[in-house]
Amino acid sequence: MSETSYNPFTNAQSQFDKVAEIIGLDEATRKLLRQPMREYHFLIPVQMDDGSTQVFQGFRIQHNDARGPAKGGIRFHPQETADTVRALSMWMTWKCAVVDIPLGGGKGGVICDPRNMTEREQERLCRGWVRQVARNVGPDSDVPAPDVMTNGKHMLWMLDEFEAIHGGRFPGFITGKPVGMGGSLGRTEATGYGVIYTLREALIAKGIPIADTTASFQGFGNVSQYAGELYTQLGGKTIAISCWDNTDKKSFTVRSENGLDIGKLMSITDMYGSISKDKARDLGYEILDGDAWLVQDVDILLPSALENQITINNVNSISKQVKIIVEGANGPTTPDADEVLKERGIFLIPDYLANAGGVTCSYFEQVQSNANYFWEKEEVLEKLDAKMTAAFHAVYDTAQKHNLYMRDAAYVISINRVAQAVKMRGWI
């Protein structure tokens, strides 16, 4: 989408440095928090179904665990990089801190494309990933979860391999597991619903009825599907959604001025979030290019795909009608584009607040797994709503009190909490 190359880890450090200056963080703590504490890079040989062997590069990066075990997903993506994983691990630290759960930040990944792998090949890859880091992760040290192009089945294979290696039952080792196998009810919806809980509170604070708003989403994976579902239930109208076309290897946008039917779109979407173009046309929807989601005349934009999607090269194409941007994805806005949004007065709900519903519910799953006692879905979602609502208002109140941009206010809260934990432990 951009002629400019953006390094997500550089972006994450830039965001941190700015707020470290605002709060006057001491030099030693800055040095400790602006980079990961530990990194594991490894190779995973996998026997493919045709008898050949492919070697995949994997990562597990732990940014900080002062507030509790590292927590963060595992991505399978052909464009995965160590710097992407570093950035995501840092953002996970801030995300856990802003919603005030006792976890730190970590992230994992494998450079691969599961869309071109059989289920058996994916299982071997999952088990191989665990074998490489089994001594460095666990329920009391680092708890993985699903992320881009990974799911509950992958997590269960990883759990099974971890338990086989360590000779016991450790259901709290990993979250995002299938319900009935240690997974939590409500986990599938959690990230998307959390996005809308924060949006709902922002609209209330601004005196805007949600039923009077329109929205455009980037991405139609798990986050957008359930965010779109709840947004529609609350009365909002979704005008456009972009997604990836695995056949043409490029993105496209589905659009309807009268509003998209999220349920029908979910029924014609594959497990990787790719909507069937032909079936979307049959529903009477327009098919536009992949960037069209960004330029729609809507009130709300929800970038919910990958990082570095709103950049200095396209930020000025955002419609003047847009009042709120909710970052469902991690790091979708580059720092230079962020400055433009700030100047334009667009209200932004930053990623590690907006999409913290996933890690919050992962924490709930971890608690339930360790206790071997599971809650009903209604209870999970009530607890999630309470956590997300409290976190939003803590950030919003800080922003109002100190005249800060919402991203900066969220960082002030998160970094102060982690810095305090580091100092209380005597690390600095």
Image: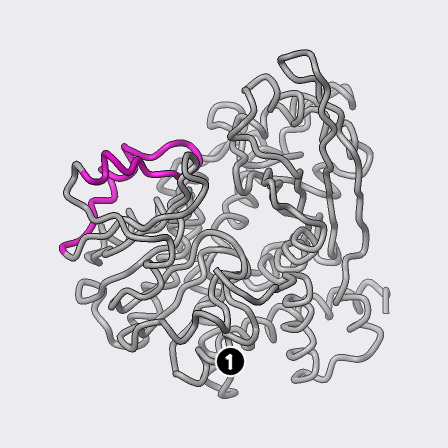
Q: Residue at x 70, y 66 (%)?
A: 418
Q: Residue at x 84, y 74 (%)?
A: 28
Measured as percent of width and height from the top left, residue 352 is found at 54, 61
Residues rendered magenta in the picture: 258-281
Above or below 412: residue 125: above
Toward the viewer: 11 or 158?
11
Above or below 29: residue 216: above
What's the amino acid at mark 1? Answer: Glu
| Magenta residue check for 242 | no
Above or below 166: residue 214: below
Toward the viewer: 342 or 232?
342
Q: Classify mark 1: helix, strand or loop.
A: helix
Quadrant of the image occupied by residue 410: bottom right
Horizontal relation, residue 66 to residue 346: left or right: right
Classify the position of the C terminus by image quarter: bottom right
Toward the viewer: 252 or 307?
252
Measured as percent of width and height from the top left, residue 386 is found at 42, 57
Number of other residues with Cα within 10 Å of mark 1, as a class: few under 14, some 14 to 19, many 20 or more:
some
Measured as percent of width and height from the top left, residue 18 is found at 65, 79
Q: Residue at x 64, y 40 (%)?
A: 144
Horizontal relation, residue 97 to residue 202: left or right: right
| Magenta residue check for 273 | yes
Residue at the spot of label 1: 339
Horizontal relation, residue 390 to residue 413: left or right: left
Quadrant of the image occupied by residue 422: bottom right
Toward the viewer: 264 or 167?
264
